[in-house]
């Protein structure tokens, strides 16, 4: 590889394009040390981990991407449930309750005086923790998992939403649950990163990924939907991350009388769709104008996509209108529903 190339080529990153904010240079990072159990806040440039940390050594950890709206964590119950489910699947004791974890997130937001912002994105990272020596077996781990809370001011670049996405199909397939369950928000994103690099090299905004049977499944960092003859089609949940925004869109469709199917479908059916859009915690929804060079519909945002964007924004506003106490009570009593 020539020296003038970046690691992985340069792509548009359109699904996660942001408006630059200098406040991010001085944010405080919340960290719960797994050995001492102490929670501390560190300036961004001083938040450091050991080279013997499980995430650094072997990518043994999980994460969540969250949004906060005026100090309220958006859809907190669903996100924290998903994190705890992944931790249980990976036999990882977080050493903290769901309510306790939400409290740490609130402490981090408040220390950064982010209570009035509507554009906060949080990366919540959990590592299995410190190791006594570089070795994969958790028997050499010391203490509890490390918890890191990274809040940033991240307003979505409006241009990314108005111009639409260009997708390119990746040769890299989504894996089955007996290899690495795609339900886990696992630190190892190697499959998605390789698909992303392919999209960068091919000059498109995001990679569209297929399952082992050749059906359309998801994008490398967002979930994917199409609309055909007034019906919203979502790929079945197999082989993909169980997106919180994805499920919200499906629920909104059902409550609002918009026909919706969870179904296997081919690239041919995606090419012939009237509308297509991607969903995720950060971008919410972004319409797709092109797949593999084929224009979707008339290349503009379709009426059902527009309506779903409005309905989703209303759902976010309702969720964030509650007090922290109400949200915490819901988190504490909640159980994961499959």
Image (tube, helix red, strand yellow):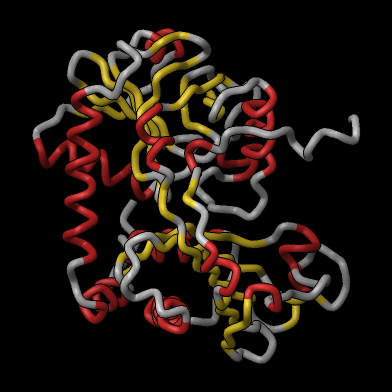
Side of 270 where 148 appears, left or right: right
Q: Is 70 above or below relative to 32?
A: above
Residue 93 can be seen, yes or no? no
Quadrant location of residue 77? Answer: bottom left
Who's the residue at 37% across and 35% down the image? Answer: 161
Q: Is 180 above or below relative to 92?
A: above
Give how far across and how far down residue 66 sits, in percent.
Answer: 42, 60
The count of marks equals: 0
Residue in the foreground of this view, choosing between 295 and 175: 295
Who's the residue at 56% across and 38% down the image? Answer: 13
Toward the left, the furthest residue is 257
Q: Is 248 above or below relative to 206?
A: below
Residue in the foreground of this view, choosing between 198 and 82: 198
Side of 18 where 191 appears, left or right: right
Who's the residue at 55% across and 74% down the image? Answer: 27
Give how far across and how far down residue 98 sits, in percent.
Answer: 40, 76
Residue 205 can be seen, yes or no? yes
Give how far across and how far down residue 300 sits, in percent.
Answer: 31, 19
Toward the right, the furthest residue is 2
Q: Is 100 above or below relative to 210?
A: below
Toward the front, the furthest residue is 22
Give how far across and how far down residue 116 sits, in percent.
Answer: 31, 72
Tell me the quadrant of the picture where the N terminus can be found.
top right
Who's the residue at 36% across and 50% down the image? Answer: 244
């Amino acid at each position: 590889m020539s020296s003038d190339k970046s690691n992985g080529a340069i792509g548009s990153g359109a699904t996660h394009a942001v408006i630059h904010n200098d406040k991010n240079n001085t944010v405080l990072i919340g960290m719960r040390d797994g050995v001492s159990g102490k929670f501390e806040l560190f300036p961004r440039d001083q938040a450091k981990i050991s080279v013997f940390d499980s995430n650094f050594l072997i990518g043994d950890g999980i994460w969540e991407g969250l949004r906060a709206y005026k100090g309220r964590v958006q859809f907190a119950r669903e996100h924290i449930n998903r994190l705890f489910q992944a931790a249980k699947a990976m036999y990882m004791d977080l050493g903290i309750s769901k309510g306790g974890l939400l409290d740490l997130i609130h402490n981090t937001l408040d220390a950064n005086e982010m209570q009035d912002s509507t554009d906060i994105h949080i990366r919540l990272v959990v590592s299995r923790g410190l190791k006594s020596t570089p070795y994969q077996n958790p028997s050499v781990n010391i203490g509890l998992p490390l918890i890191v809370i990274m809040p940033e001011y991240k307003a979505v670049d409006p241009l990314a939403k108005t111009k639409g996405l260009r997708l390119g199909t990746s040769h890299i397939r989504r894996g089955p649950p007996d290899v690495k369950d795609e339900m886990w928000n696992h630190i190892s994103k190697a499959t998605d990163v390789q698909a992303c690099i392919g999209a960068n090299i091919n000059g498109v905004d995001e990679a569209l990924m297929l399952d082992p049977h050749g059906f359309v499944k998801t994008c490398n960092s967002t979930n994917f939907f199409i609309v055909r003859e007034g019906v919203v089609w979502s790929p079945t949940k197999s082989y993909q991350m169980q997106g919180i925004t994805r499920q919200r869109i499906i629920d909104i469709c059902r409550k609002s009388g918009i026909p919706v199917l969870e179904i296997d479908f081919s690239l041919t059916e995606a090419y012939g769709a009237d509308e297509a859009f991607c969903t995720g915690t950060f971008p919410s929804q972004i319409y797709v104008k092109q797949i593999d060079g084929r224009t979707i519909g008339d290349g503009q945002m379709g009426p059902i996509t527009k309506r779903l964007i409005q309905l989703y924004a209303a759902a976010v506003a309702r969720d964030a209108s509650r007090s922290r106490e109400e949200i915490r009570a819901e988190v504490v009593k909640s159980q994961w529903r499959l």
